[in-house]
Each structure stands twice: as C-alpha cells, then as structure tokens.
Amino acid sequence: MTRRVIIIGGGLAGLTAAYSLTGSGYETLIFEKDSVLGGMLASYNINGYSIEKYYHHLFESDNELLHLIDELGLRERVEWLRATTGYYTRGRVFPLNTPIQLLRYPDLKVTDMIRLARFVMRSRKIEDPIALDEVTAREWILRSANRSIFDNFFAPLLKSKFGREMDRVSAAWLSSRINLRSNRGLRGERLGYIRGGFEELIRAIEREIRERGGVIRCNTEVDRITIEEGEATGVEIGGSFVPSDAVISTVPPSQEKKTPATPKIPELENGTGTHPTGSGIRYQGSLCLLIGLEERLMKETYWLNIRPETPFGAVIEHTNLIPPEEYSGDHLVYLATYLQEADESLMTAREEEVAELYITALEKLFPTFNREKVLWWRLARERCTAPIYETGYRKRILPYKTPIKNLYLAGIFSHPNYPERSMNGSIRAGIACAGEIIKAV
C-alpha cells in the first residue's frame, strides 16, 4: 500500500493534493523552493497587512474552491463585490460596464458594438468550448464577428496576454474566457475575495495538513526525482536521497535547466506508451509590479485593459475592489505582464530597472499620476506560470498518472486548467491526482 507521498511544489495543486491525501491517512512531504507557500497565490506582508504577489479573485463558478473554503471554515470571510472594467485608448480610460458606456467606446462603431454583443451572447451559449480547440481565436472572431471588432477590441487583449503568440491561440481559450468574465450586471462583474487576503486560505490548508501529520519544508529545492527501473523511488535534495512510495510533481515537465525536478518523459513527448497525450506544451512567464500609493490612480475602475504599446498589458487597482482602509490606507495597484521567451530581458533585469520602466510608462498613461505618491513597490516574476493555449492544446494535456510507475503530475498543465487556468482548476487537479494515488492502492 502506498503510504508516503512526496509532493514537489507548495502551490494550490500541491497543497490540495496533500490535504486530500492526509485526509485519507497518507504521510505527505511537501518540498517548496520558495520561503513561503502558495506559489502564484503567495502573498507579501506589508505594513501589517497581507496582499497577494499576483492579483487574484474568486468567481461564482469556482465550485471546488468554494467547497474547500467551506471545509476550512472560511466562508464567512468571503465577500462578493462588483468589479468595474475599462479600456485605455486615445489617451483616456473608457469604462465598459453599462450599455451606455459601451456605446461611448470610441474604437468601435455602434453597428460593431451591436455585433460584438451578439458575438458574446453566442459565445456564452457554447456548451463545450474545447470543440474550438483546432480553430484560432483570430479565425473565429473574423468569421463570427468582423475585422474591426478583432483589430479594435480583441487583438489588444490577445496581445497583452500572449504577445507574439497571439495568432496561435485557440478559440477554445477565448470562448472559455468570455464565459468566465461575462457575469456582469449594470454595475460591473461580480467577483469574490477573502477578507484578509488569500493568505488566509493558504494558512488554513497548511494548518490542516500539519495537524494531520503532514510535513512541509520551504526553502527546499528538489534537485531531481529518482527513477530506478522505471519507477519513482523518491527525490534528491542537496545530495541526500529522500525515499517515498509515490511522487507528485507540480513543476511543468520542461526540458529547461531552470526546472530540473521533473524528468524528461519520452512517452509523453512522443504521444506513445500508456498515455498517448502528446506533448509540447509551451509556457509563458508572469511579471507583476505591485505599487502602494498615497492616493487612488483611477476613479473607480478595478481592471483596465491597455490598448497602446506599454510594458504591461493591464492595470488592476485592487483597492477599487477592496477599500484601502483594509490596507492601512494604502492604494494598491498591480501592473501586470505576461512574458514570452523573447522577453527574457525583463525576467533578468534588476528590479529597480523594471520598476523604473513601469512607473515611467504609468506616468505617460496618466499625466496626473505623481511618482512622489509611490509609497513602496514590490516586484514578482516567475517563469512557466501559464500555458500558451495554442490550437491543438487538447492533445498535449498531461495525465495525472505517468508511464513511470508511482510518478504523478498535477498543475497548470492538467486537464482542469484547460481551456483556461484558475485557482479552481489547480484545486481540481490536486484533488484528482490524489485520487489516482488512492485508487492505485
């Protein structure tokens, strides 16, 4: 019977897998390379409060996440709020929350706006977005809407998300995104947030794992997974061998030297063997500059998409969702970017250089913005944080159970994180992967 399970990575997928396994009597060891748990959901502690390194919020459709929140006794801390969105174009912010505001958007004619509304409504009726896996988003928009709508509305959004890969992105991703983000009333989109921050969720999962006997070690990077005669037997850390009956890796199986923990699995790459899943998932990185301001940047907009060329693709003013009183009066703004391989300079540049680049760009967008009002800033950046959802991605999804005996995978590359990744998807992946181990006994 499999009893001891090593989990590489203390993000949501890894934590949820450990939570499920310890609940079924398994001994678990989590190894996390960073100093804190949470992965992309990790937080800063600033001026006595907690705030996520990367922007996060809940959706009403996040069923598994909300169920976990219930189990951990955090439901009373969940707040549901109206989040407003806007589009920056022609030197100003245009809110896009009410029919009148949509009609005022200057880059689309009224007839185009009506056609866009019909396109969105048709998209919401698609029951299986994955059926669009082999169609590019560009092709789908041009066929179902028109070129003006693509060029003036969707192209800037796709570019900010996928950069030069935008023309390879599948319509499955876009359809799923539209369904996810079209829960709007006349006052904006309904989003959820845990009062006190998502660190409350991470702490609650960690506490439950430890109380059940699970072991968690931060600042511990796994050098490699030990494979003997086609079977995972443990991991190596700093030259020492740690044995286990099974290993779950939440690290993308990349051939890059930057992610050595998960071995190359030819059966997955070639689409042969036990799991003919194909491979070739390509990833992009994430960069978020979080700045604390003395005063608000935007009047009411929570999420601002940017049309002009800027180093970042979106401005998220967190304190236009959660009031600044929750953060010692600081106004919190994320400047968010996705990085492709060609953007390596931003990944390796000094933090001060990146902050200067972003703050200077913010001054150009908002002439009334005064950098002297910046109280502090923090920079988070990470490689391989999001798949590039290109056409044919469905065939590349990785299985939980690999051809290597007792080696399992769960993370952003798993089925629940297609056609769009989410906290809910990572939780589903962690639970499902744990279930595969339990079933194998």
Image: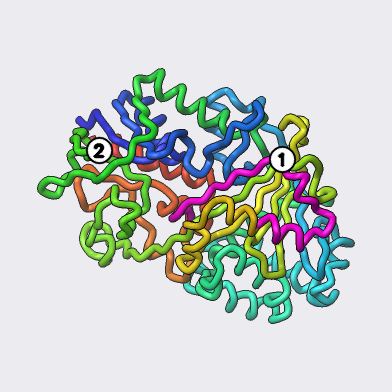
Which residue is depicted at the point 83% across and 68% down? 105
- Of circles 2 and 1, which is in front? 1
| Residue toward you, 381 or 373 | 373
Visual colour scheme:
rainbow
Q: Earlier in the sequence, mark 2 or mark 1?
A: 2
User: What are the residue bounds of the magenta stretch?
Assistant: 358-386
Q: Which residue is mark 1?
A: 375
- The reply to whether dot 2 and dot 1 touch (C-beta < 8 Å) is no
| 66, above or below 372, in the image | above
Report which residue position mark 2 lands on.
237
Amino acid type at image mark 2: Ile
Relative depth, front residue between 127 and 15: 15
Is 152 left or right of 142, judged from the image as shown?
Answer: right
The amino acid type found where label 1 is placed reads: Leu
Residue lying furthest top: 211
Residue 363 belongs to magenta span: yes
